[in-house]
Image (cartoon, rainbow, N blue to C red):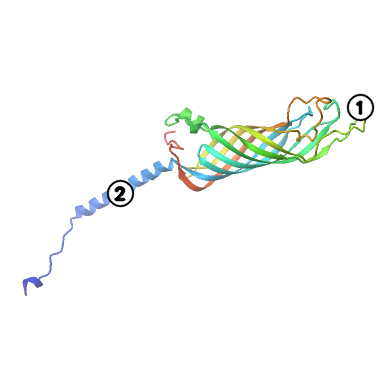
């Protein structure tokens, strides 16, 4: 047999090499898992839906007002975890007034309104360094916000004429409109309790808050009486004590600070 025809010797791989490869693979998986876990603490979902209920009442030129339960629904875009922008729809009821002593002029109303708002909330987490502080990790989710919107009034019941002869002619018609559209400015204050999913990202949240709305012009009660005849110290307003439930979804985006601090 010629020398060049001789079989080449096989390369022998030491068992230690296989063990070393397994160790390297194991540590790579651990490091990747730790990195993914740490990265998850920075992540949040871009979009959300919210449904809630409110305990609301109006402030109008009719002195006596009643409380009612209303309903709210929102579509949310999270610019970041502490700066949500929401389009909100409200459905509720305002009522008040009646014969004396509820209203000295006998005015009464029942408004089944619909409102739409675009508003933005700013959480304290946008401004404070809450890392490794239990107290600040709680405080970071207080927020305040504002925006603009419109209230579509639907006054289904209204005392149109003077029912009290002692107050003047009974054919006097109270001025105003039953179906007026009013621009409105909200002022929002609240707290959001985040609930984290299996990826350690805020997948749900519970909001509690107080919302106050300045309504431009007279429309909530359907009365627009001249101040020269009727006491009217302020424009229409209404308030809500609110609780809402949020569900977050959509693209996952990273923030520049930990949303969830694993130490707390």
Which picture quadrant has residue 262?
A: top left
Neighbour class for label 2 at 10 Å: few (<14), some, many (≥20)? few
Q: Quote the CA–CA distance across marks 1 and 2.
A: 92 Å
Query: Where residue 53 appears, x then y in whole percent?
Result: 66, 39
Depth order, front residue of 90/247: 90
Could you tell me which residue is drawn at 66 percent across and 39 percent down?
149
Judged left or right of residue 153, residue 209 is: left
**Which badge, 1 or 2, is on the more N-terminal residue?**
2
Q: Which mark is residue 30?
A: none
On-image quarter of the N terminus: bottom left
Could you tell me which residue is drawn at 23 percent across and 50 percent down?
20
Which picture quadrant has residue 52?
A: top right
Q: Which of label 1 and label 2 is nearer to you?
A: 1
Which picture quadrant has residue 248?
A: top right
Q: Which mark is residue 26?
A: 2
Query: Where residue 43 appears, x then y in whole percent?
Result: 45, 42
Depth order, front residue of 68/235: 235
On-image quarter of the C terminus: top left
Residue lying farthest to the bottom in this orientation: 1
Q: Which mark is residue 168?
A: 1
């Amino acid at each position: 047999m010629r020398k060049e025809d001789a079989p080449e010797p096989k390369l022998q791989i030491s068992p230690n090499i296989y063990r070393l490869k397994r160790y390297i693979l194991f540590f790579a998986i651990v490091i990747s898992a730790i990195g993914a876990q740490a990265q998850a603490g920075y992540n949040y979902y871009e979009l959300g839906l919210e449904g809630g209920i409110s305990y609301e009442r109006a402030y109008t030129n009719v002195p006596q007002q009643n409380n009612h339960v209303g309903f709210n629904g929102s579509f949310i875009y999270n610019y970041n975890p502490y700066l949500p922008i929401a389009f909100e729809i409200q459905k509720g009821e305002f009522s008040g007034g009646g014969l004396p002593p509820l209203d000295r002029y006998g005015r009464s109303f029942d408004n089944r309104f619909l409102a739409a708002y675009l508003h933005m909330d700013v959480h304290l987490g946008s401004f404070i360094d809450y890392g490794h502080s239990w107290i600040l990790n709680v405080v970071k989710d207080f927020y305040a916000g504002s925006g603009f919107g419109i209230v579509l009034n639907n006054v289904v019941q209204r005392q149109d004429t003077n029912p009290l002869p002692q107050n003047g002619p009974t054919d006097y018609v109270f001025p105003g409109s039953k179906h007026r559209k009013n621009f409105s400015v909200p002022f929002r204050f609240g707290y959001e309790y985040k609930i984290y999913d299996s990826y350690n990202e805020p997948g749900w949240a519970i909001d509690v808050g107080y919302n106050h709305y300045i309504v431009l012009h007279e429309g909530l009660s359907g009365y627009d009486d001249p101040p020269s005849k009727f006491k009217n110290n302020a424009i229409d307003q209404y308030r809500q004590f609110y609780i809402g439930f949020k569900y977050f979804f959509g693209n996952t985006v990273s923030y520049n600070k930990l949303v969830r601090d694993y130490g707390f």
